[in-house]
Amino acid sequence: ATSRTARAARPSAAGSTPTPPRIGIGQAFRLSFRPLDLRGDVAAFPRIATRTKALWVPVALTLAATVLVAVVGTNGTDLVSVLTNFVYQYFVFTPAIGGVFIAGFLAPRASWLLGIVVGLVAALCFSIVVMNFSAQIPPISTTPEQAASTAFVVSPLMGALFASAAAWYRRFLALSSPNRARQAANAKRSNGKSRTANARR
């Protein structure tokens, strides 16, 4: 009986590891939250900003949307103008939730800090648009100066919130999907085997 139990406990194939168990939706919801590590996030920010896509991709999209608004405008009825209005609403207009959501979803950590930075970039771009290209966008209910000052307050705050929510959502998807966990485990084993094979050559 002991030998039979030992055989059952051994992996079915050499080098294989047990498949991560699937957890419930409620448990995945709770485990997806992370405590704020202010010092660690600030220390990791330069590495994240330079070695991942979490910052430069949303910043590039925000800048591209701003140029598109300045050149094409959002008031037309053609397809290009409609698309320009779409990217303007999500990447430039306050609060610019598109860019910060991408930043948070791509961030390995410090999502809130990336959201603040992307929010500041979006506020700057919005200020440029309302100050210099107001004829290219729908009318605003305040003066350009008031709209710009509001953007520099609202966009970073909402950026931190939406980026954190995006990072939580990414962790939730990873925890609640057994296929994702299995693929990550398989990828880790494959990388380990390839490194071992290279070391033996």
Image (cartoon, rainbow, N blue to C red):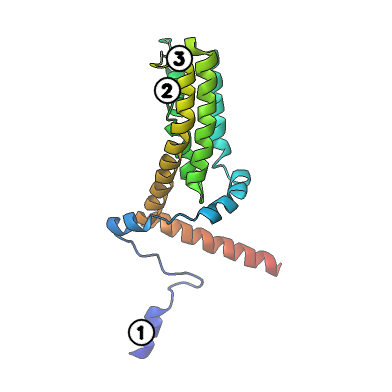
Most extreme residue toward the right is 201
Q: Foreground mark, 3 or 1? A: 3
Residue at mark 1 to residue at mark 2: CA–CA distance? 61 Å
Vertical side of 132 occupied by 109: above or below: below
Q: Residue furthest bottom?
A: 2
Residue located at (31% from left, 59% from top): 27
What type is the residue that disc 3 sits on? Ile
106, 19: nearer the viewer:
106
Nearer to the camera, 159 or 59: 159
Q: Locate residue 171, reporting x and y percent.
A: 41, 52
Q: Are marks 1 and 2 in contact (CB under 8 Å)?
A: no
Amino acid, disc 2? Phe
Mark sitting on residue 137: 3
Tell which circle, 3 or 2, labels the residue nearer the N-terminal end.
2
Q: Is residue 90 above or below residue 198?
A: above
- The label shown at residue 86 is 2
Residue 55 appears left or right of 198: left
Location of residue 63 in the rendering, given as x and y in whole percent from the top left corner: 56, 27
Q: Earlier in the sequence, mark 3 or mark 1?
A: 1
- Residue 5 is marked as 1
Q: Looking at this view, is 15 or 175 the one in front?
A: 175
As shown in the figure, which amino acid type bears the numbered disc 1? Thr
* SS label for mark 1: helix
Residue drawn at x 56%, y 40% is 55
Viewer-closest of 4 and 192: 192
Mark 1 / mark 2, whichever is N-terminal: 1
Image coords of residue 12 (percent x, y): 43, 73
**How many numbered circles does the render carry?**
3
